[in-house]
Image (cartoon, grey):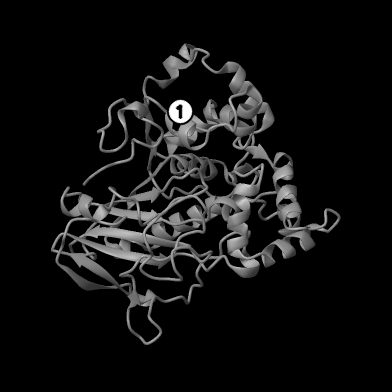
Amino acid sequence: MGNTISYDEKAYDLNLGDKGKIRGIQFDQKSRRYAGIPYALPPTGNYRWRKPRPLPSSYTYANGKDGPFDATQFKAICPQKTFHVGKAEGGDGIYSEDCLFMNIWTPVGDEKTSKWPVMLWLHGGWFQMGDPSQDPGMDPTELISTGGLNAIVVAIGYRLNIFGFLAGEALLEESQGDSAGNFGLWDQRMAAEWVKENISLFGGDLNNITLAGRSAGAYSVEAQMLYEFRKPGPKTSLYRRVFMNSNAIPAQPKSLQETKPQFEEVCRLFNIDEEDSAKEKLARLRQVTTQDLVEAIPKLEHHTFRPVTDHLFIHSNVMEYLRSQDFAHEFKSRGYKILIGEVANEETLYSVYNSPTEPSLDALKMQVMNYYSPQVSERVIKRYGAPASEYLEDWKRVFAYRLSFIDEKVAPKSFGVAHAMDKPFWK
């Protein structure tokens, strides 16, 4: 999220008490930014394809010399093949598997006495690409400074594509039932827990947190909400409001069994023996370099890595649960509010950037099955265009919008208002 308006910039140090001190940037007398703040330990080396590890309780933010942690520069983002961003200002270049950072923007004021609302933002990009810090047109610096937003914006970096969403029974076996995929979703959850624990130090109101996202970020918002509702143990509420731009309610993700062809294809590409044990396969895959994994993605027939039904983060019967009294009860008892958005020409972006390899039904099925299970894909294709009027009454009380106009500076008129064009613009 790079701002384009010129500001008078100066360093600003924020005291986090026992957790140390961080140095951000203040823009005029209007807003502050703290970039590249780690919320978990690096998921690198032998920790690739494992759940994120929390920062130890003894962790303090410092520069190693009793000075403040440098939060003036953006850090690297998750490696990806198909997304172009500007050069990262800090860290190990543009991309790194060490990518579990967040960026925080706040108004200017006294953090000890302020209680600003908080928006926790999950970026989009099909779960294959994206960036919490470089999205043109959406820099919260200008939303707060020029737009006058009196709130905190937190943008989360999380693992993507093969690094965040490789899945399979081999991972479940190796972890002894602790995880089987969905590592990017586990990252987001840990970031939300960090925000709940720490955002008051930045002047945030713990009881006024909104979880928001666009495209894959909107998918993630729903996944996070359902995880919170269905997870075992004491009830928790990390946020009270959810906001989903584009792609709000997905179908049931693939099962672990249905991801097996993708996992096996990755192993074949790196000459890993089919007869090797799960532990041996994963050990070999963890030895593959970051760059080789990135280069492998477009070579795969099953090239799209997405959330899966693992019965740990995402449970079965998602749609049935959404229609059930259990979901309605949880939603109401926690005092949740939801805003869902859609656009008039959802399909245009997919037809340009992710279209079938040829104009045939089989090619369409293959592309759809990169996202969903064969059964779901067949049902979707059969029912495409079927009327939804029978569900109209259920949606009458939902806060929603449908965007049918966009400035031609954003996209050619021929695109209409395509998927993800309902992102906020504030400059």
216, above or below 25, in the image: above
253, above or below 21, in the image: above
Q: Which residue lies furthest to the right in this view?
A: 275
Q: Mark 1 points at which residue?
A: 347
Q: How crowded is mark 1: few (under 14 residues within 10 Å), some or many (20 or more)?
A: some
**Which is more toward the observer, 252 or 112?**
252
Residue 68 location in percent, x, y? 32, 79
Residue 269 lies left or right of residue 391; in this view the side is right
Tell me the quadrant of the picture where the N terminus can be found: bottom left
The residue under label 1 is which amino acid type?
Glu
Q: Which residue is at a point 60% across and 53% down the rendered structure image?
A: 162
Q: Which residue is at a point 38% across and 79% down the rendered structure image?
A: 62
Q: Which residue is at a point 21% across and 62% down the rendered structure image?
A: 113
71, above or below 417, in the image: below
**Which is more toward the observer, 417 or 147?**
417
383, above or below 265, in the image: above
Secondary-structure class at tag 1: helix
Q: Which residue is at a point 66% across and 44% down the rendered structure image?
A: 310
Residue 63 location in percent, x, y? 38, 81
Viewer can see residue 213: yes
Residue 246 location in percent, x, y? 41, 34
